[in-house]
Amino acid sequence: MTTGAVRERHGAAAGAHRAAGRVVDILELVVRTHEGLPLRELSAQLEAPKSSLLPLLRTLTARGYLEQGALGAYRLGPKAFELGMASPAHRAWPEIARPALRELMQRTGETVFLGSLGGDGGTAVVFVDKVESEQVIRYTAGVGDRRALHATSSGKVILAFLPAPERERILRALPLKRYTDRTVTSLPALRAALEDVRKTGICVNLDELAVGAAGIAAPIFDRDGHVAGACAIGGPTDRVRPRLKPLAAEVKATARAISALLGHRIDPPRASRKDQP
């Protein structure tokens, strides 16, 4: 948006509440970006002093409507999903993924979730969509619900594939709360678990958040190769544990299919020296 357009819009809104209008201006700018906008860019595009924008940004971030990335850029937070204010890209990917989620639920019989990195400094995973199991006993949670990153399969799989600087920033800020005897509560153990996730491309969680609840998650990547979120199933541990291998394969395949729908392409492996003619 050009500065002229900003001035024209402000002129049309003469008489409107200035602070409320500025909040809408901020959200309208941020909603058009995938990586977010730093304070200096928001200040330049809105032709507003940083000092007047910063309190608004802090309030929106504290309330979950914005969140800050590793480099300080502001992007939409989880509350934006709840109010239907997500950007076209963020709004579209759950919609694009839903048929695949429904098929995964039908094949596995378990509840299926899409998870995304939430607000609060990135210390939670937020569910942005779900397809609930038809089983009488099933895992259930609502869209917009948050779960601890370190105690969930979705949270750990997202953490594992974040850029190293952002991952380390989040790890240092995580309150490693113990939920059960199986919860990982030390940074060395969590880092080791994340390394395993990066190697296997899958995260299995048995009884770490709640006794009797299990989750299996795989990463979803966008067209730029950044982790966009996680595809996960959740179910009773007694039902999931005997089927870990086939369920993990189903989740991984679905996450790859959703990533492909988002434009992610995996380059074919290069031929090794012995394979070359």
Image (tube, helix red, strand yellow):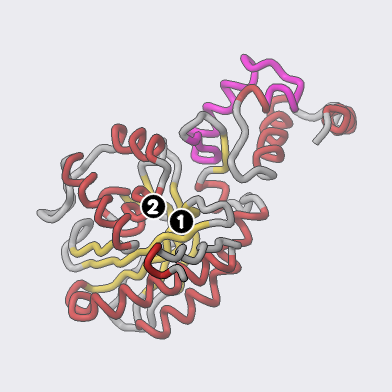
Q: Which residue: 73% across, 22% down?
A: 44
Horizontal placement of 179 versus 262: left or right? left
Local packing at callout 2 (Cα closer than 10 Å; few below 14, some 14-19, many 20+) is: many
Q: Residue at x 24, y 75 (%)?
A: 244
122 up-or-down from 105: above or below: above
Residue type at mark 2 is Ile
Q: Earlier in the sequence, mark 1 or mark 2?
A: 2
Q: Is residue 66 magenta?
A: yes
- Cβ–Cβ under 8 Å for marks 1 and 2: yes
| 202 is higher (above) or lower (below) than 131 | above
Relative to 151, residue 37 above or below? above
What residue did someone put label 2 on? Answer: 158
Q: Residue at x 83, y 32 (%)?
A: 2
Name the residue beneath numbered marker 1.
229
Q: Which residues are magenta?
A: 42-69
Whether residue 43 sits left or right of residue 11 in the image: it is left
